[in-house]
Every structure is written in structure tokens, then in C-alpha cells.
Image: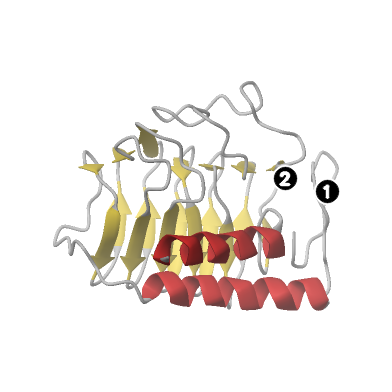
Amino acid sequence: MVGDANFPPGTGVNGTLHATPDAVVGEAQNDERYAYNTWAALAANFTPINPELAGLTLTPGVYKFSSGAQLNGAMTLDFLGNPDALFVFQIATTLITGSGSSVAVANGTATDGIFWLVGSSATLGTTTTFAGNILALTSITLNTGANIECGRAFAQTGGVTMDTNHISGNCGVNNFESGRTDFGSSGFSPTSSLQIITPEPGTFLLFGLSLSLGLAGLKLKHSARKK
């Protein structure tokens, strides 16, 4: 984890905290910018007109939104049985989910194949169950009880604000089928998941699980797909 943080009693962190800028911080930020630019450069397969994602079942591809995107309900990402399938959402401005919204993965595992590129800020509503990696140019806010399955949250210039959230980078087989939310009881490794429990929101400049290693893996995955 990278950023500035004061952890109150009851906070749980698995991993290493880099509270001041150092070589790890710099590498993580550079890797995040590389990953954002790499996915942003992909040609779009779909250009949705309606910004609302609720009720949709999407297949792999690159989805380009000319403005913002929103999710007020449930959506499904269908991997079609391909573990190497890729979903990239290129969102020009904001990504906002309503309370209790969810992103479910079907016919595959999320692995590192879901990327949400947000041109400004992302906000996950209370008790949202989300899947994938959020890379925002400005900031990310996870409201109370919002969870990210098999993913990370990165902000380039602003902060990642958390309030009683769970973010897991463990993408084990079938952990996320049909939007399962049983964190900690089915294959979640204590060394690859992180839980923040705070009475008040905590803000981090850049948040992720195994930042440099994780983003390096994303770059390698993309390079392997191009061959």
C-alpha cells in the first residue's frame, strides 16, 4: 500500500505500508500511468450511447464511453469460458455506482482481465460489490461497505478514500462466479487480500495490492496477448 495514512484502532492491513514517497511509490505510480495509457490506447469495439450499465450482460471487448458511466443495479460480465478474455471500459469522465449495485462474473474467472479507466473520478456507492481494476486519473471513493473483488484501486493525482471496505486481489478459480461476496470463506488468501475497517473514511494517494508487482503483471499480460 502506498500513501499517507493514520490507522485507527481496529484497522487491519495485510501487506506493506509505504507512508512516504520512496522508490516503491515512484515505481508504482509509473506502472499505473503505463497501464492506464496502454489500455486507453486500445481501439474500441463498442461505443455505448446509454451511460447506464444496470441490467446488461456484456461480452469481452473494449467499451468506450464519451462521457460518464453509471451502474444502478446489477450487471454481468460474461467471459464466454475464456480465462484470457479482456474487458476494458474507457470512461471519459466519471464512474458512479448506486447503493447495492453489483458486477458479476459469469463463465470464467476475473483474473486480471477487467479494467475500468476513469477520466476523472470513480465513486462506488454503499454496499456495492464490484469486480476489476479501477484506474482513475483523479480520485476514487469507496463508500461504506463497498467491496472490490479481484481487483485494485488506483488514483493518479488525487486520493483513494475508503470507509469499511474490502478489496481483494485474489482471483482464484470460481471465487467470483455469479457475483459471490463471501469474502474470507472461499479461497481468499490472507496474504493477497486486504481489509480496511475505519470509523471514519481514510484517504490514500495511491492504493493497491502488491502495487509494483501487480502492475508489472498487468503489463506482461498485455504483452503476451499481443504476440
Q: Amino acid at mark 1?
A: Pro
Residue sitting nearer the eye, 47 or 73: 47
As drawn, the label of residue 118 is none
Quick one: SS at disc 2? loop
Q: Name the residue located 54 percent from the left edge and 76 percent from the top edge.
A: 34
Give the residue number, with chain letter if any, for mark 1.
8
Task: Name which quarter of the figure residue 216 lies in.
Answer: bottom right
Q: Earlier in the sequence, mark 2 or mark 1?
A: 1
Asked whether the viewer can see residue 54, the reply is yes
Asked whether the viewer can see residue 196, the reply is no
Q: Where does the image place residue 99, in percent across and percent down from the top left?
A: 40, 41
Q: Where does the image place residue 188, in percent across and percent down from the top left?
A: 66, 31
Q: Amino acid at mark 2?
A: Thr
Image-based side of 38 in relation to 164, left or right: left
Q: Name the residue located 45 percent from the left edge and 61 percent from the top edge.
A: 122
Q: Residues within 10 Å of mark 1 (few under 14, many from 20)?
A: few
Task: Name which quarter of the figure residue 11 lies in.
Answer: top right
Tell whether label 1 touches label 2 (CB within 8 Å): yes
As drawn, the label of residue 198 is 2
Q: Quadrant of the N terminus?
A: bottom right
Q: Quadrant of the C terminus?
A: bottom left
Q: Where does the image place residue 174, in percent across and percent down from the top left?
A: 49, 27
